[in-house]
Amino acid sequence: MSLLSFNLPLAAFLPFAAAPIAAWATRYNRLASAWVAGLTTLLTLAILFPSMHAIFAGETIIQQWSWLPDIGFNIAFRLDGLALLFALLILLIGLLIIFYARYYLSAKDSMGRFYAYMLMFMGSMLGIVLSENLLQLVVFWELTSITSFLLISYWQHRQDARQGARMALAITGAGGLALLGGVLLLGHIVGSYELTQVLASGDLIRGHDLYLPTLLLILLGVFTKSAQFPFHFWLPHAMAAPTPVSAYLHSATMVKAGIFLLARFFPALSGTPEWSWLVGTAGMLTLLIGAYVALFKHDLKGLLAYSTLSHLGLITLLFGFGSQMALVAAIFHIINHATFKGSLFMVAGIIDHESGSRDMRKLNGLFKMMPHTAMLAMIAAAAMAGVPLLNGFLSKEMFFEQAISASDTTLAAWTIPALVTLAAIFSVAYSLRFIHDVFFNGEPIDLPKTPHEPPRFMKIPVDILVVLCLIVGVAPMLLIGPILSVAVAASLQAPAPEFSLAIWHGFNLPLMMSFIALVLGVAVYTVRHRLFAWHDRCLHGIEGKAVFDWLQWKTIRFAKKVTDYFDQTTLQPSVSWVIGGALVLSIITFFQFNSPLFGDRTLMEADVITILMALTLIVASLLTAVLHHQRLTSLISIGVVGLVVALGFVKFSAPDLALTQLSVEVVTIVLLLLALFFLPQHTPQERSYIRLSRDGIISISAAVAVFLLTMAVLSREYSSIANFFIENAKPGGGGTNVVNVILVDFRGFDTLGEIVVLALAGLGVFAMLEGLKLAAPAKDVEGLEWSHDPHPPIMQTLTRLLFPLMLMVAVYIFLRGHNLPGGGFIAGLIASVALISQYLANGIDWTNDRLRTDMHRIMWLGLLIASGTGVVSMLLGYPFLTSAFTYLNWPVVGKFEVASAIAFDLGVFLVVVGATVMILVELGKLSHAAHFINVEDIK
Amino acid sequence: MEWLIASVICVMTGCGVYLTLRARTFPVVLGLTLLAYAVNVFLFSMGRLQIGIPAVIDPAAAAYTDPLPQALVLTAIVIAFGMTAFLIVLALKARSELGNDHVDGLHRSDDELKATKHNSTKTETERSES
C-alpha cells in the first residue's frame, strides 16, 4: 500500500497525534513544543505534496473506507482544487503563526498547551476541508468549535476570555447542530452522504420539497461559523484570545470554514432566489455593519475584528450574486483577505507586545520607534483599503464589477453598487485610521512600555505575507492563477470560466467606484471626531452581546425553575415523580389500547396449598410495610417473602431460580442484619397524614396497575422465541439445562456484563467501607446487654463439620450445572454461604487465619477467566465467547463431556464468591471493630 | 392460579413502593428489595405459569417451560443482591458522615422535628456512653 492511498486521512490525523507530543515536550524544553508544531505542519505539507500534481491536472482524489455502510457513514477523504487551496492556506499561514507565536507568548504562558490546542485546531480544519463524507465533515466542524473554544479561552484567568470563548462555543456549536440537521436532510434527499453524489444532484436537491429547510439549516451553520449578521457578535468578543490565535482563527481559517462550505455546496444549493436572497442579504448587512463599526473601535484588534466581519460579508455577498465570475472573485478575495488580514493581526500583536496597549487613543506617532513594522502595516492596510498595485485592489475591483452586473437584474438598479461603495468608503476610512492614528498623529500618551522594534524574527512572518500582497498585486496571474483556476473548477464542479487577473482594465465603472471610495474615505477620516461624537451619542451600547446575554440568562433561569419544580433536593418528591410519571404514562397507553383488557387464555385452577402460600406471602409483605417502624421485625417478615418466592419458583417449574433465590435470600438477610446493627432500630413515626395518604394513593395505584398489567399478559396466548434455545441447547451448546446454556453460551456476553456489575458493586462497597468507623450500640433493641459469647461452641462445631460438605455441594451443583439445574451463579452463592457461615460461627480472625486468600484476587481471577474464554475463541477466529465442547473418556469415570463454557461458568462462580464474601466480610469487619472499640471504652 | 400470582405481584409492588417513599434509609432499602422480588416474579410469569414441566432437555418430555425468562430472572436476582448491598452500605456511610439516616441526609418537615430532637439526644447519650 503506497502512501498515496491514505495520505489524506494521515494529513488530517497527524496534527491530532502530534498535539500530545507538543504538550509533553514542553516539560523538557520550553521551545520544544514550537518545534514539534512547526515540524508537524511541514510534515503534513510534505504528505500532501505528492498529490498536488494530480490536482493541478484537474483530478479529484478520493480515499474511502467503509465503516457503518448501513447509515452511510464512511471514512472518506477528498482532495480537489478547493480543498487543496484551503489546506494550503491552513498549513502555510499556520506555519507562519506558529513561528510568530513562539516570540509572542511570554514566559508565563504555557507553550505546550498553546501548541497542542493549535495543532488540534489545525487537524480539525484540515478534516473539514478534506472530508468527502458529510457526516465526517460535521464531526470535524464541531471539533473546530471545541478547539477554538480552548484557544480563545487560552488565558483562562481572564474573565473576558472565558466569556468570549463561551459565547463563541454556544453560537458556533448551535450552528454545528443546525448544520448536522441540514446534512441529514441532504443525505435523505440524495440518498448518500458522499460529496461526489451530493454535488452531482444539484437539480434533485433544488427541486425537492425539503430544499428550503435544508438550505436554512446549512446556512445557519455557515452564518454562525463565518460570523454573518445576525450571528456576527461573537467574533469581536473572541478577540480576547492571544493575537496569534486571532490572526489564525479569525482571519485565515475558522471563520473561512463557513465560506468554504458556501463554495463547497455551491453546485448543490445555489442558483435559486432563496439562495440569492438569504446569502446576499446576510452578506450585504454584515459588509455594511462591519465596515461602519470598525471605524468607531478604539481597540486595534476590535477594528480588525469588525473589518474581518465586513470582508467576510463581502465574500458571502459575492456567493449570493451566484454567478461564476462572482465565485472567482470570492475565492480570490479569500486568499487576499487571509494574507493582508493575517499580517495586520500580527502587526497589532507586535504593537500590543511592544507598547503594552491596543488603544488607538493612546497609541500615536509610533513610526519613529518602529519604522519597519510601520512600513509593513502600511502596505497591508493599503491592501485592505483597496489601493492599486496591491492584491486587495484586484479582488475589490472584481467585486465592484460583480455588484454592477448583479444590479442589472433587479429593480432598484443602483442600490447594490451604491451600498458596496458606501462600505468601501468606510473600509478606506478605517484602514487609514489604523495607519494614521497609530503611527503618526502626534506623540504616544502614557503607554505602559516604551515602544521599540520587536525581535527580528517576530517580523519575518509579517514580511512574508506583505511581500505576497505585493507580488499578487503586481503580477496576479503568476502566483495565484493556477491554484485559483483549479479551486474555482472544483467549487463549480465544472470547468472554470475564463478570467484574467490584471491591474489595468481601462477606465470603467469599477475603477470609478474605487476612486470615489478612496476620496470619500479620506474625507470621512478627516471628520472622524465629529462622527465619533455622534456615534457615541446615538448608537452607543447597541450590541448583539446584550441580546445573547439576556437570552442566556432567561434560558438558564427557565431551566432552573423547571428543575426546581421537580427536584426539591429531597428524595421523596423525586421518587413520587418517577412512579407517578410511570403511572400516568401507562394509564394513557392503557386507554389507547383498543382490544379488551383481558384475553381468553384458559386459566389454571388454584390448589389449596398454593393459595395458602400466596396468602402467607401477601401477609408477610403487608407486615413488612406496616411494621417497618420496628426494623428487625420487618426484616424477618421480608425474609419470609423471599423464601415463599423461592418456593413459588419450585412450584412453577423453575428449579434454577428456586436455588438462586434461596441462597441469595440467606445472604441478603445476613447482610441486612449486619447493617441494621449500626442503624437506628426504630423508624420515627411520621405525623404528616397528607404525606401518608399521598404515598398510600401512589402505592395502591401502582399495585393496581401492575395487577392489571400482569393479568392482561397472563390471560393471553403467546409465542416465544424459546424454541430456538430448546432446540439448539444440546446440539449447539452441549448442555441439556437450557437456562444454564443460555447464561453461559447463547447470552454469554450479557452474563459477562452482569458479573462485571456485581464485581463493581463489591468494589464500591469495599471503597465506601474503607476507613469507615461506626460505634456499636451499647444495648440491643430490647435494652439488653450483648452476649459475651459471640461464637457459641455448638454452632462452631457444627459449621466446621458442615463446611466440607457445603463446599462439596457447591462443586457438585457447579459441575452438573450445564446439564441439570445448577451452574456458576448458584454454586457461587452456595460456596459463599459456606464461607460466610464460617465467619459468623468462628469469628473473622479465626477464619482469616485459615483462609488467606484475598477476595479481590478471586474476583479479578473470575473476570479474567470469563473474558479469557471469550478472547480465546476470538484468537481461534470465532466471534467473542463462542463455545465448543467435546467428549472425553476417562478410566473409571467413563465418557463425559467437556465444554469450554464451563471455563466461563468458573469465571462466573469465582466472581460471585469473591463479590459476595467480600461485601459481607467487610461489613462483618466493621461490626467486629465496633465491638472492639466498645469493649475497650467500657473497660 | 394466574389471579393468585397477579395478586402476589400486586401486593409486593404496593408495599415496595410505599416503603420506597419513606424518609429513612432502611425502609427504602427494604422497599427496593420487595420491588425487586415483584419485578422478578413479574418477569418470570411472562413465560406463563407451568406446573410440573421439565426445564431440562429430556427425550421423554412433551413440552418445556420457557427458559428465556428464567435465565433473565436468574441474573436479575444476583444483580438485585449487588444493588441491595451497595445501597445499604451507602446508607451506613451516610449515617456515619451525616449523623442521621434520613434519605436526604437532613431533617426537614415539622412533624419530624420532634423525632429529630429525640433522636439527637439519644445519639449524644450513645456517644457519651461509648
Image (cartoon, coloured by chain):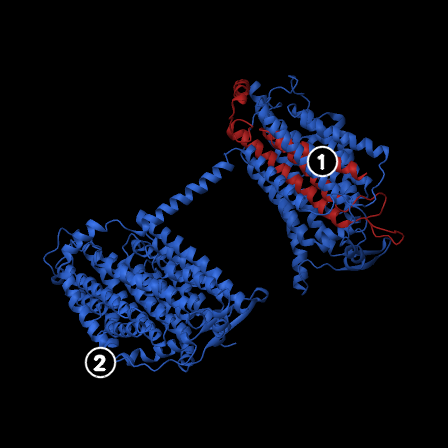
Chain colours: A blue, B red
Q: Chain letter for mark 1, please.
A: B
Please give the name of the residue rendered at 29% of the width and 65% of the height, measured from the top-left corner: A311
Question: Relative to A850, is A489 above or below?
Answer: below
For the residues labelled 2 and 1, the Cα–Cα distance comes to 91 Å
Q: Where is mark 1, residue-wise?
A: B10
Helix, strand or loop at label 1? It is helix
Question: Relative to B32, is A97 above or below?
Answer: below
Q: Where is mark 2, residue-wise?
A: A504
Q: Residue A373: image x %, image y %? A: 18, 65
The residue lying furthest to the right in this view is B60
Same chain for marks 2 and 1?
A: no
Question: Relative to A405, is A252 above or below?
Answer: above
Question: Relative to A56, is A832 above or below?
Answer: above
Q: Residue B23: image x %, image y %? A: 57, 29
Q: Chain letter for mark 2, please.
A: A
How many numbered callouts? 2
- Asked whether residue A68 is in view, the answer is yes
User: Toward the viewer: A332 or B70?
Assistant: A332
Kind of residue sitting beneath label 2: Trp
Please give the name of the residue rendered at 73% of the width and 32% of the height, measured from the top-left corner: A641
Name which quarter of the figure residue A91 lies in.
bottom left
Position of A687 compared to A827: left or right? left
Mark number displayed over residue A112: none
Kind of residue sitting beneath label 1: Cys
- Asked whether residue A839 is in view, the answer is no
User: Toward the viewer: A865 or A98?
Assistant: A98
Helix, strand or loop at label 2? It is loop
Q: Residue A902: image x %, image y %? A: 74, 53
Name which quarter of the figure residue A852 lies in.
top right
Circle 1 Cα neighbour tier, 10 Å, few/some/many (<14 / 14–19 / ≥20): many
